[in-house]
Image: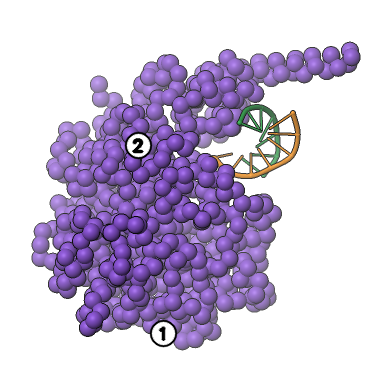
Chain colours: A purple, B green, C orange
Amino acid sequence: MVLHRRLDYGFNGYQVPVVPRASRSARGRVPIKKKFDDQRKRAFEILATVAGKLLLESEGSGCFDSSHGKDQDNRVKNNNKWETEDPGRLSNADPCEKERCDEKPFTCLPRMKGHHQSCTLNEGSHVPDNFGFDISFNSGNAQGSEKASFVEKSAAVNGRRACGSRSCKVGGDSIHGVECATSLSTPVTKRKIEAESSIIRNVKTGNVPFRGTLNDKMVLAREPPALVCSQSNVITPSFRGFIPPGPASWQDDTVKVVCRDDDENSIGCTSTHPSTMLKAYRPLPDIIDRRIRNLSASRCWRVAPNLFRTDKKANPIYHKVKTCYARQRSQRIFSFKRKKFLDRSPLSKSSGRFCCEGIFNSPDKRSNGDNCGAALGGSSSVASQQAPPRSGDCNVKLSIKAFKVPELFIEIPVTATVGSLKRTVMEAVTAILGDELHVGVFLQGKMVRDDSKTLLQTGISQDNKHHSLGFMLEPRHAQIMPPECTEDPPLLPGGTSQQHTKQTASPVLQPGSSNVSQVSPVMNLSSCVETNLGVVPPLVDTSADNAMPKSQALVSVPAISMEALAMFALHQKPGHSEFVQRRIRRPFSVSEVEALVQAVEELGTGRWRDVKLRAFENANHRTYVDLKDKWKTLVHTARISPQQRRGEPVPQELLDRVLAAHSYWSQQQDKHQLKGTGLQLCL
DNA sequence: TTTAGGG
DNA sequence: CCCTAAA
């Protein structure tokens, strides 16, 4: 019996504009211990950093445009203007830029109360301290408070305040500054990214002036990437002039949306649900921004040291940042818990690879030598821009305009809210991006699988083919293991299946729905299977305290699944132990709650280890501390009014049992205490 | 390591 | 969920 008519949305790729952000290394001092809100944010950060670096490197000497600040002072002044969100700044800016912003192209996300903030990087100028990168999606209509909060992020530029949330342009791409990074006097061309990884180690800074092509890119950027339901493949932005005549794979700024329902199991069969998809698409920037915002928020103190060189009076933000710094500092003792982290972090124990390290810095042949550097130094997906090879220098200059993200399938009940849909899409994308990323290269629509081939052999080095070179982000183990998309393995004791059934019947977007995503033939990604075989990717050591799949590209609706997927998207580079990651939030399902209640009823409170062993022995992601915490919240939940409860509703019956068990065991505890006291008194 | 409790 | 004192 079909409880829900489900809609399957296949997102045949997202455009992930490459937006640079600051490199950790350039930031100078890194906090001894820094906890990130979650791994996904870290993944985004990494991605953004990498991508942005690539772009920067490729664009070569991209620096701040002199028109926006011929010297530092002017630039800072401009920064101040940005900070005050003076839209009039645009009047002084490149007309194209203004136009671009007015038309809300994807590269010009509304930020900070709707004002686009951008500047242009040009050769010869410098990157301010808080020049940063982040990722934004191709939605020009991101709204709301998420953006505004960027205003809160501030940083110092060479001792002067500057808004940490600016948008700049690099070769047509927007750069949303998030935080402090390099020294002001550090030209872009000098900036390397050794800190994050050695990705660009071999990159030769492409000294390709992009001015000449800037407008071309702008033309491209001008068109909002409306979600167009078409049969075309995903398209990353490309130069119009370079659009290959070939099959739909290079249509402009379109994102294929494949919509399915239960009657259409055929992968290739697509229908269109434009309105729905547009809605579904929109939340992405919000999410991303939230991630970035949180990220920057979590780090706002990191830039503080620079601020101490500033003049308080002249820089109100100084206080804000300093306050933030002080507060965080007071809250956290920056003790470094690397060991703890390593012990707990699955991936850190395993591959320990940086997200893209395997791509750019792996020992294999896929990226070594100048070819790698060249390709990366300018890696260009779509908006490739190639300088004529100089004699004796056959480097390929590329510029990654955007990454293609693997196709994504979502199944969601028709009864789900739009908000659920948004969240689902977001989480799916997040999960993908949060995974251990692998960069796929496709040339003229075909994936280049042979990593050992040289660019020359592959044809990438040929000018006339450059336009069809693309980069795609794909989960590292996408081809290796079939990801699970079901809820956490039914690790609960007997009776779980019924609970799951109960859960499935819930109209709420429920994890237990056992959604099975469909295989994406395009991406060659495995489908989710309703098994708990625990297939282990060869590259990942699961001896750590988890048995969860680590790589999923296709994601089904369950939020928990999404969380689970993202959970292991931890890209930890050995030695970068400051990246202490917070575990992903994984709300307890009703069945888990039931199992917990049952165990506590039997064992009592205060025996969390036993509870764990009894009811969650195989749920490696649930520690006894987690169970204890959950019980605590359950008790609290049971005591508050149903209106005040949030999250997935717990059946009242369970909550009653919680209260009963809690009071009972509390009594028992009291009795024991009294007993002990009495004994002591007697003695 | 586990418990307990604050954040 | 995190952190940590205390057992």
The part of the image, by quadrant, that contains residue A29 is bottom right
Residue A427 in sight in this render: no
- Which amino acid type is shown beneath numbered disc 1? Gly
Residue underneath mark 2: A536
- Which amino acid type is shown beneath numbered disc 2? Val
Q: Nearer the viewer, residue A437 or A564?
A: A437
Q: Nearer the viewer, mark 2 or mark 1?
A: 2
Residue A561 in sight in this render: yes
Q: Nearer the viewer, residue A245 or A683?
A: A683
The part of the image, by quadrant, that contains residue A565 is top left
Tell me: residue A456, above or below residue A231: below
Tell me: residue A578, above or below residue A213: above
Q: Residue at x 21, y 45 (%)?
A: A524
Tell me: residue A437, above or below residue A556: below
Q: How far apart are the two marked residues, 2 and 1, measured between alpha carbons?
A: 50 Å
* Quadrant of the rendering where the N terminus of chain A is positioned: top left
Chain to which the residue tagged by mark 2 belongs: A
Do dots 2 and 1 share one subunit? yes
Residue underneath mark 1: A124
Image position of A352 (left or right of A322): left
Q: Nearer the viewer, residue A647 or A48?
A: A48
Q: Position of residue A348 (x, y in %)?
A: 47, 47
Q: Secondary structure at mark 2?
A: loop
Q: Position of residue A550 (x, y in %)?
A: 38, 41
Q: Nearer the viewer, residue A209 or A189?
A: A189
Q: Residue at x 55, y 75 (%)?
A: A157
Chain to which the residue tagged by mark 1 belongs: A
Within 10 Å of disc 2 (Cα), the crowding (few <14, some 14-19, many 20+) is: some
Q: Earlier in the sequence, mark 2 or mark 1?
A: 1
